[in-house]
Amino acid sequence: MLPDPPNCSFASDNAAGIHPAVLDAITSANLGHALAYGEDEWTRQVETEFNDLFDREVSVLLTLNGTGTNILALATMLQPGESVLCTDWSHINDDEAAAPERVLSTKLISTPSVDGKMSVDSIHARAEALGNIHHAQPGILSITQATEWGTTYSVDEIGELCEVAHSYGMRVHLDGARIANAVAALGLGREGLRKMVVETGIDTISFGGTKNGLMAAEAVIHLTPYPKPLGQHLRKQVNQLGSKMRFVAAQFLAALDDDHWLAWASHANAMAQQLHNGACEILGDAAGPPPAVNSMFPVLPNEAATALRNWCFFWDWNSVTSQHRWMTSWDTTQADVDRFLEGVQLVMSSVGDHN
Ligand SMILES: Cc1ncc(COP(=O)(O)O)c(C=O)c1O
């Protein structure tokens, strides 16, 4: 009954392959020997590129995966006895197998969220623990941009969260596994990044690459001066020091060149928008709100979700609300979107026929 499935799934940007420009960069870096562990010219160059990107001297620790990057970022920020304030849906709370608690001997204080976003009121409420010797001391606010629910904080919202957190002496970490999608959605190019994270007062970023066409390439970026040797030791301790670092650096060089990172993320965002436009015609309000970035969360009857998922895979997101996640990536095409929508239309009308 259903046609051939699309060429891609709508499961995750993690499911997408490596962008050809990134693969080319890896191949170009594959020349002879270069010193390991970041003592190479590609790593030096990428440090310069990140300084240009943020328009200031930043500290860059290249890393290998998103969870480890968050762990390293938090490791560089935490003091003994401190806790990390985050949302209930945050990746560090929900999807990292308690690695922050285990590896960092810290406590995550998760707080209920709307659309995956932290609120200023939650910071005020949790700050009541400050000074109480029996309570872990909230030392870090961690927010995700774009969030796990595909929403984004506005620049002003981030500014306000940072201001309140800083007023309590907390530092602010941004899990930017999908920071490219969030910056692309602002439509201000590099200036958007600077407004979003520099002017707002973010202290440390987990800067994602893997979800945006790179292969195992992420970075911890400190926007305020950070002692490099300390960061390097911590990176080694949390197993994020890759020996063949030049290949990680080469990937970022390809992504930052001519701001491809923003073009790739913009494309993923645009495909999600197209998907949502078509889904609205079929599902109406059940398509959910328009995507801010590259994911949407439709409500589907179980029977339809199963049939569609067996045809072209995607993840269930919230079993209580019957929401599912459809996610696009740098390589999703309009033809993939059209084919997927064709399937949605067919499945939904056959489910309707049974009713
Ligand atoms: C918001 C967010 N942060 C961090 C990660 C961690 O990435 P990894 O799976 O590479 O550990 C993910 C992965 O999906 C994510 O969605």
Image (spheres, rainbow, N blue to C red):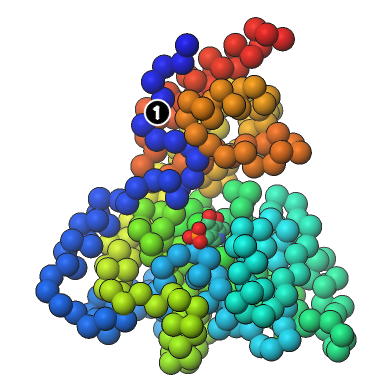
Residue depicted at 49% across the width and 45% down the height: 12
Q: Is residue 257 left or right of residue 232?
A: left
Q: Position of residue 250 (x, y in %)?
A: 27, 67
Q: Is residue 218 visible from the viewing direction of this image? A: yes
The extreme top residue here reads: 353
Circle 1 sits on which residue? 6
Q: Is residue 253 visible from the viewing direction of this image? A: no
Q: Position of residue 173 (x, y in %)?
A: 60, 73
Q: Position of residue 75 (x, y in %)?
A: 57, 81
Residue depicted at 69% across the width and 56% down the height: 89
Q: Is residue 327 left or right of residue 106?
A: left
Q: Quadrant of the C terminus?
A: top right
Callout 1, which amino acid? Answer: Pro
For mark 1, does the 10 Å Cα neighbourhood hold few (<14), some (14 to 19), or many (20 or more) residues? many
Q: Quadrant of residue 191?
A: bottom left
Residue depicted at 73% across the width and 58% down the height: 88
Q: Is residue 226 left or right of residue 324?
A: left
Vertical comparison of 132 with 287: above or below: below
In the image shown, does 270 or 231 lie closer to the viewer?
Answer: 231
Residue depicted at 41% across the width and 54% down the height: 212
Q: Is residue 222 left or right of residue 330?
A: right
Q: Quadrant of residue 34?
A: bottom left
